[in-house]
Image (spheres, rainbow, N blue to C red):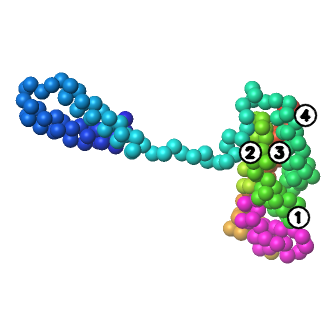
Amino acid sequence: MGLAVVLGFLDDFDVLTKVIANVWDWCGAHIEITVLTGLLGAMAALIVLRQRVAAPPSAPSSSPLAEVAVPAATLTEAHTKADKETFEALAQKVDRNLVNYLRDHDFGNPWDRELIRELAFYVDGYNEVENTFHDPVLEHHRQDLHAAARKFINLVSQYGTWSKHLDGYNELDSSRKVAEEPPEGETWERWNRLRGELGDAAHVVVEAYDELVLNARLRAP
């Protein structure tokens, strides 16, 4: 029982015991048992009401997508067919060419702006109910992929800038200074750290995508 409930209980108990004492003094020792029972019942009802009023409302779902999947035991052939179509549509938004680029590219070098923008379009516009899976396993992997892609795009937006030498490419914002300075010092250390962060985030996207593909081939062939 929480502290607030206990304090409320004590407040109610104190008030009602005073009422009972006054009634007892008024009626004397011959107070009827029905009167005392009624007063005790009123005290219990008041305590229950106090607890209900003080209780916080139930927390809403953290995401409208939290419960879109159906239990695995109730999946039907229609669910599987719909999930297959959902995966095929997703694979057109995030295709193998993009995933391989994320896997192989060294983000210490300039990166293809339009190719990375495709992933940004996926992050911004492909996380609605219509894009979810019925199968809870596939939906879990889809959400992992979307979260990984969002983190990567946020890092790219934070650390990247337009390349001065390559049209259509972006690069780390410290790349220009690094190219002009020896491989030492704060600028070099920052560039190398950001390069590693982008590379690691890209690999998480690749791993999440591969997990989704493997499971989709098994569960929605």
Q: x%, y% of residue 46?
A: 31, 38
Of marks 3 and 4, the one in the foreground: 4
Q: x%, y% of residue 104?
A: 88, 52
**Which element type, helix, strand or loop, lies under badge 4?**
loop
Q: Which residues are magenta?
A: 152-178
Residue type, mark 1 in image:
Glu
Residue that mark 3 sits on = 209
Mark 4 burial class by Cα count in 10 Å: few <14, some 14-19, many 20+: few
Q: Earlier in the sequence, mark 3 or mark 2?
A: 2
Q: x%, y% of residue 58?
A: 51, 43
Task: Residue 114: give its label.
Answer: 1
Q: Earlier in the sequence, mark 4 or mark 2?
A: 2
Q: Earlier in the sequence, mark 2 or mark 1?
A: 1
**Which element type, helix, strand or loop, lies under badge 1?**
helix
Residue drawn at 61 percent across, 45 percent down: 61
Q: CA distance from mark 1 to mark 4?
A: 31 Å
Query: In the rendered structure, are the residues bearing label 1 and label 4 in contact, judged by CB atoms less than 8 Å apart?
Result: no
Q: CA distance from mark 4 to mark 2?
A: 21 Å
Residue drawn at 7 percent across, 29 percent down: 28
Quadrant of res 31 = top left
Of marks 4 and 2, the one in the foreground: 4
Residue type, mark 2 in image:
Asp
Quadrant of res 115 = bottom right
Residue drawn at 57 percent across, 46 percent down: 60
Task: Residue 221: give its label.
Answer: 4
In the image, is residue 141 above or below residue 174? above
Q: Nearer the viewer, residue 50 or 194?
A: 50
Q: CA distance from mark 3 to mark 4?
A: 16 Å
Residue that mark 2 sits on = 144
Q: Is residue 76 visible?
A: yes
Q: CA distance from mark 3 to mark 2?
A: 9 Å
Residue 198 located within the stretch drawn in magenta: no
